[in-house]
Image: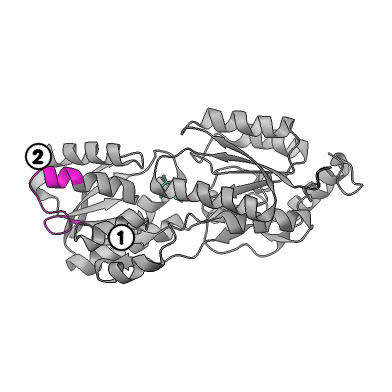
Amino acid sequence: MQTHGLTRRTLLAAFCLVGVSLAACEKKAEEKSAEPKAGATDAPAPNDTPSGKLRVGFSQIGAESDWRRANTESIKSEAQNRGVELIFADAQQKQENQIKAIRSFIQQKVDVIAFSPVVETGWEPVLKEVKESGIPVILTDRAVDVSDPNLFVTFIGADFVEEGRRAANWVVKATGGKAMVAELQGTPGSAPAIDRKRGFEEVIKSHPEIKIIKSQSGEFTRAKGKEVMETFLKGGDGPRITVLYAHNDDMALGAIQAIEEAGKKPGVDIKIVSIDGVRAAFDAMIAGKLNCTVECNPLLGPQLFDAVEALAAKKPIEKRIVTKEGVFEQAQAAEAIKARQY
Ligand code: GZL
């Protein structure tokens, strides 16, 4: 790829030079910390194609939840708004499909590769191939666990540990520090599942009367969330459950169906806190069936293409771009839903 007269090799050398100047081998935890990293990364600027359009290859995880569909819509619509040629690949939840898509983007010599990694590990080999190609990588939504932070230019996404803390702080406030918690975890090995659990447990460890008595993955989907909640309720500990903590709204919405089918009142007999803040969660809060949703903003399109355009203009980019989010409870839902964009 010829870029502003620089050959790819020169560019790569410059990129590595800048990369070396960054604090090397930052630990994964630091990588995902909410604090934006000081200093900027002058990554290679993408090349304008003969058509004059920037070309971005994007590998999306799938369409497992309302959050994911809103995230896809934001990225596709923003690409259109910015006049960027988007090559979009849906991985159907499979890491091997994301790796295939990334390799195809290299072959197509796109200007930037962006993706939302379905799980944290297993990316080192393909990201080294991308680095060899000189194409900059932007992570959106979820982080990767790699030894070399220079394998990507920036990570744009939420602080999932903080989201877990916010969910637990709501449980402390809503229950006076006494709860028997059933937990529906997200996709095993994914950054949000790992970190939302971590943040929740960090808070409850100072509240000995809040205990997680059931915990299993509902894979971020309504169907699996319902199925696992049915199992929780039928189990010996079922009658002891007083709070459900779901790592996303879709699993909570599935669990609400299971709770109702078991003859219990969701939001009353079992209080429910989940994460995402999708419209259906606000509807459930208005119906009194969900008690709290911790926002996780899927509308990352504008920030993604700000970063793409900064790369093209060879402007510095923060290593970590954290999305801004809130917490919504039942009392606010009827008013807040009017302003919701997803
Ligand atoms: C969070 C995102 C998660 C959402 C789920 O940034 O990765 O994946 O919380 C989605 O709804 O499936």
Range drawn in magenta: 257-271
304 falls in the magenta region: no
The crowding category of the residue bearing disc 2, from other C-alpha atoms within 10 Å (few below 14, some 14 to 19, many at least 20), is few
Residue nearer the viewer, 8 or 162? 8
Q: Secondary structure at mark 1?
A: helix
Q: From the image, which quarter does the C terminus lie in?
A: bottom left
Q: Amino acid at mark 2?
A: Gly
- Total numbered labels placed on residues in the image: 2
Can residue 217 be seen by looking at this rendering?
no
Residue nearer the viewer, 46 or 42? 46
Residue bearing the label numbered 2: 236
Establish if 298 lies above or below 230. Answer: below
The crowding category of the residue bearing disc 1, from other C-alpha atoms within 10 Å (few below 14, some 14 to 19, many at least 20), is many
Q: Where in the figure is residue 9, as x and y percent of width and height? A: 86, 40
Q: Position of 44 compared to 70: left or right? A: right
Q: From the image, which quarter does the N terminus lie in?
A: top right
Can residue 286 be seen by looking at this rendering?
yes
Q: Position of 112 compared to 277: left or right? A: right
Q: Position of 287 compared to 144: left or right? A: left
Q: Quadrant of residue 218 in the image?
A: top left
Q: CA distance from mark 1 to mark 2?
A: 32 Å
- Residue pictured at 26% horizontal, 48% vertical: 253
- Residue pictured at 66% horizontal, 59% vertical: 306
Residue bearing the label numbered 1: 282
As drawn, the label of residue 102 is none
Q: Where in the figure is residue 155, as x and y percent of width and height? A: 59, 53
Q: Quadrant of residue 339 in the image?
A: bottom left
Q: Quadrant of residue 144 in the image?
A: top right
Q: Position of 46 compared to 147: left or right? A: right
